[in-house]
Amino acid sequence: MSETHTHEPDRGKRSVKRSKFLSLILRHNPGAVGITLDAAGWVDVPVLLDALAAHGRPMSRAELDQVVAENDKKRFAFDGSGSRIRASQGHSVPVELGYTDAEPPALLFHGTHPSVLDTIRREGLRPMQRHDVHLSPDAGTAVRVGARRGRPVVLTVDAARMAADGHRFRVSANGVWLTDTVPPEYLGSLPDST
C-alpha cells in the first residue's frame, strides 16, 4: 500500500474533527477561541485562524479551504472575496443571516428520531436551541439528518399550505429550508417511516 493511501483515513478523520470544531465555534460558541462573530455571523479568516492556533487547534488556510469544500452538508461559506467565513445556518448564538423570504416547494421533509415523535405530533416542530426549524428539500436528505441519532423517522411538511397560510420560509446557502415553527396540522409521514 502506498504512503498516500496509508494516511488517507487519518486525513478524513482530521477533516471531520475540524469540521465539527468549526461548527461549534461558528454556530454556537465563538468565545471558546476568543472570537466574535459580526451581526450576520461572519468572522475574518485571519482572525479565525489566529484564534484557532492560539487555542491549540492550528489550521492553515489550505486546510480551512479543504474543510469548507469537502463538508458534505456545505455547513460553511466564504463571502464573495473569500476573506470572511460563517456557518450557513444552525446557530444558537444571535445572528441575522440575511436570507430573504422564498417560496418553498410544495413538500419539505424533516428527519427525526422516533422517541420525539409523540411530542412533535402534539406540539409541531420547534427550533429548540436554534433560530429556526430546519427542513430538507428531499426525503433522502431528511433520512440522513434523522439517522444521526439512530433509526430515523421522516416527516413530510405541507410547505405549500403553510406558505398560503402566511408562514415565512427562507432557504440557506446550502439548501436547508428554514422556518420559525411547523404547527402539527402541517405534518404528515412517509408511508414507511413510522
Image (cartoon, rainbow, N blue to C red):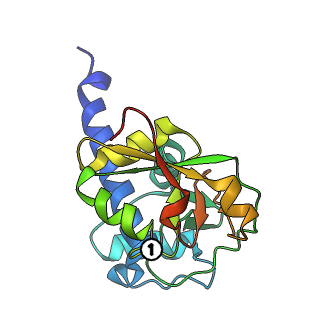
Query: Is 76 on the left-hand or right-hand side of 160?
Result: left
- Is the N terminus in the top left, top right, bottom left or bottom right quadrant? top left
Query: Is 97 on the left-hand or right-hand side of 10?
Result: right
Assign a secondary structure to mark 1. Answer: loop
The answer to whether 37 is drawn above or below residue 119 in the figure is: below
At a point 39% along the width and 55% down the height, the residue shown is: 19
At a point 44% along the width and 57% down the height, the residue shown is: 60
Along the viewing direction, whichever of 113 and 22 lies nearer the viewer = 113
- Is the C terminus in the top left, top right, bottom left or bottom right quadrant? top left
Q: Badge 1: how crowded within 10 Å, few (<14), some, or many (20+)? A: some
Q: Residue furthest top?
A: 1
Across and down, in percent, residue 158 comes to: 61, 52
Across and down, in percent, residue 71 comes to: 47, 46
Query: Is 147 on the left-hand or right-hand side of 74?
Result: left
At a point 53% along the width and 61% down the height, the residue shown is: 185
At a point 37% along the width and 79% down the height, the residue shown is: 29
Across and down, in percent, residue 78 comes to: 63, 60
Q: Which residue is mark 1?
A: 130
Residue 54 seen in the current view: yes
Q: Amino acid at mark 1?
A: Arg
Along the viewing direction, whichever of 75 and 67 lies nearer the viewer = 75
Residue 58 seen in the current view: no
Across and down, in percent, residue 152 comes to: 31, 43
Along the viewing direction, whichever of 46 and 193 lies nearer the viewer = 193
Give the quarter of the image for residue 7.
top left
